[in-house]
Image (spheres, rainbow, N blue to C red):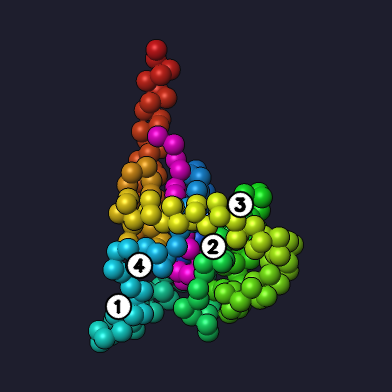
Amino acid sequence: MAKTLTLLFDFASANCWFAYRALPGLLARTGGTLDIAPVLLGGIFKATGNQSPVAAFAHIKGKLDYERLEIDRFSARHGLTRFRMNPHFPVNTLMLMRGFLAAREAGQGEAYIEAGLQGLWEEGLDLADPGVLTARLERAGLDGAALLARAQAPEIKAALAQATERAVARGVFGLPTFFVGDEMFFGKERLGQVEEELGRNEEKLGQVEEELSRL
């Protein structure tokens, strides 16, 4: 019954940037809380045989042009103006994602995710480069060297791999993927459905509370 929205997330997905940036308004309207679930998009693709839209639709006339049109529409609707396609795309985010787990363990997850999203999708940095990533994290007030050192711990590596495996077992094939309870929604274009589902959860919770008050 809890109004929790789980976002399966990897910095590698530009659409995760769009989804994350659009979520504050949705969460404010629904009273929902956000749970970020870090996974590896590359691992999901390998396990499911999926590809990025750039690769999957490159041979389809007009498809990528339409994808860009949808991005423009989404940006306009949500007032998003800072996106910049990363010149180093595709970026290997294995180190970046392991660092996120280390930062979250240290209670610095929110600052880390901002640094990563800004660096990768707003500033065009090559965050697969340890030196560049360390410098960007330090600019955000984080101890980049310590976080990346912790990111090499076997338990951090295992946690990210296991989370990716669990996501695939749950039916995830790409990102961003959202869960409200057991209901799965794929893609930033599904945020309207996500909001409706959170609203239904609120109605259910209200009904339960009303029934309990009568006991």
Q: State the image coordinates of residue 38 (x, y, percent, origin top left).
A: 49, 56
Q: Are marks 2 and 3 in contact (CB under 8 Å)?
A: no
Looking at the image, tell me whether mark 2 or mark 3 is earlier in sequence order. Answer: 2
Dot 3 amino acid type = Arg
Residue 59 vs residue 139: left or right? left
Amino acid type, residue under disc 2 in the picture? Met
Q: Which tag, 3 or 4, sits closer to the chain's start?
A: 4
Residue receiving disc 2: 97
| Dot 2 crowding, Cα within 10 Å, few <14, some 14–19, many 20+ | many
Dot 4 corresponds to which residue? Answer: 45
Q: Secondary structure at mark 1?
A: helix
The span picked out in magenta is 1-15
Residues at discs 2 and 4 in contact (Cβ within 8 Å):
no
Between 119 and 71, the one nearer to me in the picture: 119
Rounded to the nearest angstrom, the CA distance separating label 2 from label 3 is 11 Å
Q: Quadrant of residue 124?
A: bottom right
Residue that label 3 marks: 104
In the figure, residue 148 lies in which quadrant?
bottom right
Distance CA(mark 3)–CA(mark 1): 33 Å
At horizontal 36% and vertical 33% (from top left) the residue drawn is 204
Reading the image, the residue beneath label 1 is 56
Tell me if I can see residue 99 in this picture.
yes
Specify the quadrant that holds the N terminus: top left
Q: Is residue 85 left or right of residue 70?
A: right
Amino acid beneath label 4: Phe
In the visual, does 95 lie left or right of 207? right
Q: Residue at point 43% right, 76% down?
A: 72
Residue 8 among magenta residues: yes
Q: CA distance from mark 3 to mark 4?
A: 25 Å
